[in-house]
Structures are given as C-alpha cells and as structure tokens.
Image (tube, rainbow, N blue to C red):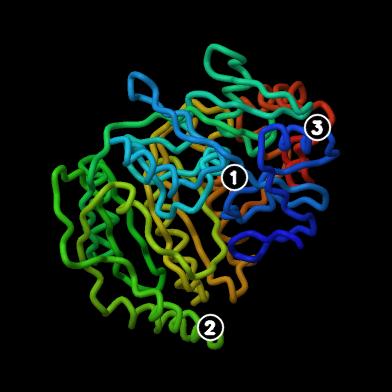
Amino acid sequence: MGWSNWSGSVSAPAAVVRPQSDDELASLVSSARKVRAVGAGHSFMPLCESDELIVSLEELPGQIRIAADRLSARVPAGWSIRRLTAALWEEGLSLANQGDVNPQSLAGAMATGTHGTGATLGSLSTMAQGFRLIGADGEARWCDRAANPDLFEAQRLSLGLFGIATEIDVAVVPAYHLAERIEKRRWAEVREAYDEWAGAERHIEFWFFPHSDDVILKTLTPCDPCEPPPTTTDMDETAFRRVLDIAARFPFLTPWLQRAMMRTRFDGRRRGPAHNIFPSDRSLRFEEMEYEMPRGAGLAVLDEVVGWIRRKRLPVTFPFEYRTVAADDIWMSPMNAGPVAAISMHQYAKMPWQRLFAEAEAIFRGAGGRPHWAKRHTLNRADVAALYPMAGRFGAVRRAADPSGKFLNPHLESLFA
C-alpha cells in the first residue's frame, strides 16, 4: 500500500515501514538504496515522495526527558506536536510558540521551518538544541553546537537530507495560558495599523478573503491565570464547506459568496492552556503556497496580489493568512535575512490551483520573497544558490553526511544535487 500526503496531491508507491526499535530503523537505513522519512504528510511539496522506502517513526518507542535546568527537553523526534505539547504540559512546560495545526511530527516541522506568528518569535527550527541522527551508514550520531557543529547547523532546517532524527533536544518555557480573540476588521484599517499592532501583541495574524473588504483578525495573549469562557471562535467548517463546494461547481460565484459569508459575525474568545489554544481544527483539504516576504514589504505585496485577483475576478476560494516571524541565523531558513511577513495562499483541493499559484508566485518572487520549503513553489537549484548564501556550505555538509545521496529524492535532487 502506498503513501499520500494530507491534501492528497502527492503520492508514492512505496510502502510505509514503521520500525519498532532503533536497531530495526538502523538496519532499514543501512540496507536501503534510497529512503525518506515521513511524518504527518502536511507538506505540499514532494519532500517524502519515494518509490523505494518510506519510514515512519510513529511506532518507535521513546519518552520525554526534561533537562535539570528545565530549559530543554529531549523528546522522540517522531512524536506529533500535539503529543509533545500535551506531555510538556504535564511537566509544567510549553513550547514558546506553535503553528495553527498540531498533527505534524516535531522532526518534520523543524526540518521544513514550520512556524507560528509573533514578531519576536522564531520558527520551530530555532528551538532545536541537538539531534540524534541515524545516518546513511545506519550509525547513530549526536550533533549540537559543541558536537558536530556543522552537521547541527545544517540539520536545524534539513529537509531530511542528513539522516533520520530519532531524538531532539528542544527548548521549552514554563507552561502558560493564552486568551484568544477573533474579530472582524476592515482591510483598510488592518493595512494601516497591523505593523503597530504586531509590535504590541505577542501573537497576531489575520485571514483575508480576497473578494471581501473585511479581515478576520486573531490575537493570542498570555493570560495566567485564566478560566475558559463559554464561547469558542473557530470558523464553522460545515458552512464553509458548503460555500466551497458551490464555488467548485460555479467558480464565477466566488466573489459574491465571499462577500456574503463575510457579512456574518466573526467574533469570539477562548482561553486555556497554550497548547490547546494555538491549534485550530482543519478538516477541509486545500493546496497551499507560502512566501516569506521582507517584513516591511508584506502588506503592500498582499495588497498587490489581492488587487490582481479582484481585477481578474479569479476564483481564489480560501482566505490569505498573514503572520509575522522573527529573524534567525539558520542556513536554509527563509527568515535568515531578517524578520518576515509570512503570506499563505490557499486553494480548495477540488479546484485548480497551479496557474493561480504560478502567477502569484511571480509577484512574491519579484518583491524579494522566499518560499516555505514544504509549500508549493517552483525553485530550482540555481534559485536556491542565489537566494541562500549558505547553500554551498549546506551542500558540502550534505555530501559528507550522505555521499551516495541515499536521502535524496527527485524533487530534492533538483534543488541540492
């Protein structure tokens, strides 16, 4: 039985093997000609595609170990963020930030630069303190800033090219609660004030249906101690699914449907443990492209893309998501040149997306954007070399760690081989 990703757009004929021990995993890796590790399949790019061997760590045994100073925890790399954050909460700890879904494996999220929102907060990759890797030869190696430092720097955002991580030391913080507020605002107001708000709020983001003049604004504020309120705030996905299915049959109705939907109320509040408030339920399948824009250019670029969609009355059915992420120093991170505005463009999985994404990508690229590695993009090897000053060093470490290219697949070969 083969494998497919969450959206159903990427599949592979290889069976997924779930080793039950480190020794079994090491044997699988050492004897394989090609191997890719898979997590929850939330990547839209064919990062895990393989016609040979795909390995999942979801059945590999392991437990969480808290450091004596309580500033980090060593955890099984294959654990989902949902499982990890629940286990940390039991220990009185949390992650400093999360994205808005939590089924992804920790290893997969770090390997692709997954992030949440917060002007002072980096991606999950910035939380990595060390990795235990099963290398191409089947041997286990530890890397951190002191031991194998070049391997560690490359592994922080690795795309799975240096081995299969079995344990990760991740930075943690004392457990905290969050208060979520969602409200509807006018796009003109948000465009004018968002950067000021982002400097004042720990977490802020918004969703913007391109054919509406309203924005759904979300903030998360630490609130210890706090009690849960009686209301929740997530979008009614049943109603949204009906809207999307109508748009899939009659794409020309998309502008009208979005304006009608945004005339309804979008406000509410939740409070609770941080790991319960960060994620939202997301059952509707979609395709996604995300570009990390220089922070100062983000709102103007979004305005340009939305203007293009409106002029051509294009059936872009999902809202744009707009977040802020702090700068980092990770070799292959889209955030390593400075703070970014992360702009995510989505399309319902039942509708065409390729041409829409290609035209929008040209706007993002033209304004200095770099794509999220796990989401739709058209970079090639020359683009990677031009966009990432450390790409050469990253490639040298990759060749030393995996001289035969065991962890490459066709997509990754087109970028790094």
Q: Quadrant of residue 157?
A: top right
**Which amino acid is tagged 1?**
Trp
Quadrant in the picture for residue 66: top left
Residue visible at 33% across and 19% down in the picture: 69
Name the residue nearer the viewer: 156 or 389.
156
Horizontal side of 152 relative to 126 (left or right) equals right
Q: For the residue carrying disc 2, how many other residues have a C-alpha within 10 Å: few (<14), some (14-19), or many (20+)?
A: some
Residue labelled with disc 1? 373
Alpha carbons under labels 3 and 1: distance apart: 27 Å
Decide which of 222, 255 is in the foreground and name it: 222
Q: Earlier in the sequence, mark 2 or mark 3?
A: 3
**Labelled pair 3, 1 in contact (Cβ < 8 Å):** no
Q: CA distance from mark 2 to mark 3?
A: 50 Å
Amino acid bearing label 2: Pro
Ranked by sequence position, the earlier of labels 3 and 1 is 3
Q: Which residue is mark 3?
A: 30
Q: Amino acid at mark 3?
A: Ser
Residue at left offset 47%, top offset 68%: 283
**Of callouts 1 and 2, the N-terminal one:** 2
Task: Answer above or below: position of 410 versus 316.
Answer: above
Depth-wise, is mark 2 or mark 3 nearer the camera? 3
Residue 251 image label: 2
Element type where label 1 sits in the image: loop
| Rendered location of residue 21, percent (x, y) | 66, 37
Which of labels 3 and 1 is toward the front?
A: 3
Q: Position of residue 357 (x, y in %)?
A: 59, 62
Contact between marks 2 and 3 (CB within 8 A): the answer is no
Using the numbered discs, state the Cα–Cα distance from disc 1 to disc 2 in whole angstroms. 29 Å
